[in-house]
Image: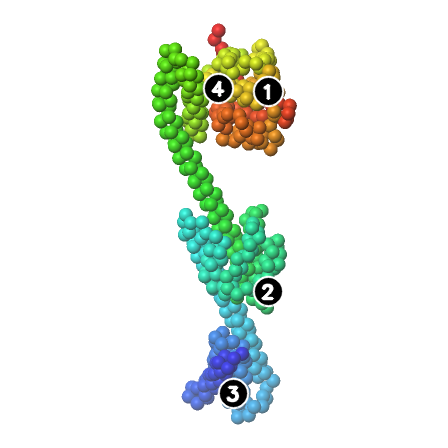
Amino acid sequence: MNWETGARRGIRLAASAAIAAAILALYYLWLPVNHTTVALSLLLAILGLATRWGLPEAILASFVAVAGFNFFFLPPVGTFTIADPQNWVALVAFLVTAITASQLSVRARRQAAEAIGRRRELERLYALGQAMLMTGGLRPTPRDFLNLVMRTFEAPAIAFFNKADGEFHRSGPAAFGEEELRAAAERDEPLVDEQRGTALVAVRLGGTVFGSLGLAGVRLSKTVLKALANLVAIGLERARVLEEASRAELAHRSEAFKSALLDALAHDLKTPLTSIKGSVTHLLARGPGPEERELLSIANEETDRLNRLVVEVLEMARIEASKLHPDRQPHRVSSLVAGALRELEGTLQGHPVSLDLPEGLPPAEVDGDFIQQVIKQLLDNAVRYSPGGSPITIAARFAGGRLEIRVADRGRGIDEQEQARIFDKFFRGREARGVPGTGLGLSIAKGIVEAHGGRIWVASEPGKGSVFGFTLPVYKGEVRA
C-alpha cells in the first residue's frame, strides 16, 4: 500500500468514526428519542459505511457506536459498564451487520468489476474482429495481426509462432522464448502465468494448428484467450484464402490473355500461309527446273509444317478457352480408326499396323473429326519415336460401360518421371531431342478426350515401347442402318 492509498484509508476511518459520533451527539443533545431509534439509526449508518467503504471502516464505526450507545443511552448512563448482559446484543448486532454488509458489498463490487471487465474484453474482441474484416481485399501478414491485437488489447509485448514456416514474429520486449512458443502450439488449454503476467495460447482452427500466441502485460481470462486465438486463426485462414484466390485469378487472367494472344497470332499467320501454300503449289505445277523444284518442295514441306503448328495453336487456344464443343454423333470405332489410317497412309509406310477391333463393339458418341485427330496424334507419335519397320498395334475393347482405344508401339519408351508430364503443354522429354515437334500434340489430344468426358493415359517402359490409351462414351441410342 503506497502513501496515497494509506492516506485515503486514514481519512475514511476518521470519517467513519465521526459519522457514528455525530449520530450519537444528534440524539443525545438535540433529538431525545428512545434507545431503539438510536440503535436503529446507528445500525443503518454502519450498514451504509460497510456498503460504501468496506469492512475496516464499518468495524471502527461499530466500536464507536457501541461505546457511545453504552455511555450515553444504556444504564448506568455516563459509564462504560453494561448492567444488563442483553445490552451486549447491540455490540454483536453492529459487528455482524458491519461484517455481513461489507462482505456483500465487496462481493457485489467484485462481480460488477468482473462484469465490466468481461464487457470490455467482449468490446475489444468485437473491435478486433471488425479490424480484421476491414482489411478488405488486402492480404495481411502475421505481423499485421500482431499489431492489431497489440493495439486493441493494449498489450506491451506480444509474440506469434508461425508453425507453417517455423518463424517467430514479435512486437515489444521479448517476453517469450522460442521453446515456450513451440510448446504452447501443442497445448489444448491456454497457459496463464499470474506471477509473470503472461499468457500463451495455441492458435488453431478446427484441426489445423497455425501456431501459438503470447501476450504479456495484460490479464485475460482463458475463455477470452481462446476466443482471441480463434479470431487470429480465422484472420490467418482468411488471408490464406485471399492469397489463393488472388493467385487463381491471376493465373486465370494470364491463361485467358495467353489464349487470346495465341488465337490472334494463329489467325494472323493462317492467311499468309494459305497464300504461300497456293503460290508454291502453283509454281510446282508449272514444271520448274530440278533446282527450283527442290527449293519449292522444301518451301512446300515447311509451309505444311508451319500450317500444322498454327492449327495446333488454334486448337490449344480453343481448349484452354473452353470453346471446344464437340458435335457428338454415333461412330463405329472401326470407321474412326480407318479414317485416321487413310490420312496417315504416307507417314505409316514401313511400319506394319495390326488391328485388334472386335466385332460387336457399340458405337461411340463422339465428334468424329476430333477423335480421328486424337488417333492420328497417337499414331504420329508412335512413328516418330519408334525405329523404322517396328510394328504398331491399335486395339479397342468395351469395359466398364465405356469404349477403350489403345495405340501400342515398340519404340524408345518414356521415363517414369516424364510420364506424369507427358500431356503437359510444350513438354518434351529427353527422348524427343532431335525429333521435330512442338510439344502440343498430346496436350491437344488430352483436351479433346476430356471434352468428350473421357480420360487419356500412358503406360511405358524405357526400351520396350509405350501404350497410349483413352476412353470414349458409348452411344446409347438406336443406330440407323
Say if 5 sits above or below 139 in the image: below
Q: Are marks 2 and 1 in contact (CB under 8 Å)?
A: no
**Amino acid on which disc 2 is placed:** Asp
Q: Nearer the viewer, mark 3 or mark 2?
A: 2
* Residue at the image point whose x is 43% and y is 40% from the top: 250
Residue 333 in the image: x percent, y percent?
A: 53, 14
Distance from label 4 to label 2 (Cα)? 72 Å
Q: Earlier in the sequence, mark 3 or mark 2?
A: 3
- Secondary structure beneath dot 1 equals loop
Which of the pair 414/12 is nearer the observer?
414
Judge from the rendering whether residue 450 lies leftward or rightward of residue 134; answer left or right.
right
User: Which dot marks residue 193?
Assistant: 2
Say which amino acid is labelled 4. Gln
- Quadrant position of the N terminus in the picture: bottom right
Q: Between label 2 and label 1, give the one nearer the viewer.
A: 1
Mark toward the start of the polypeptide (3 vs 1) = 3
Residue sitting nearer the eye, 396 or 27: 396
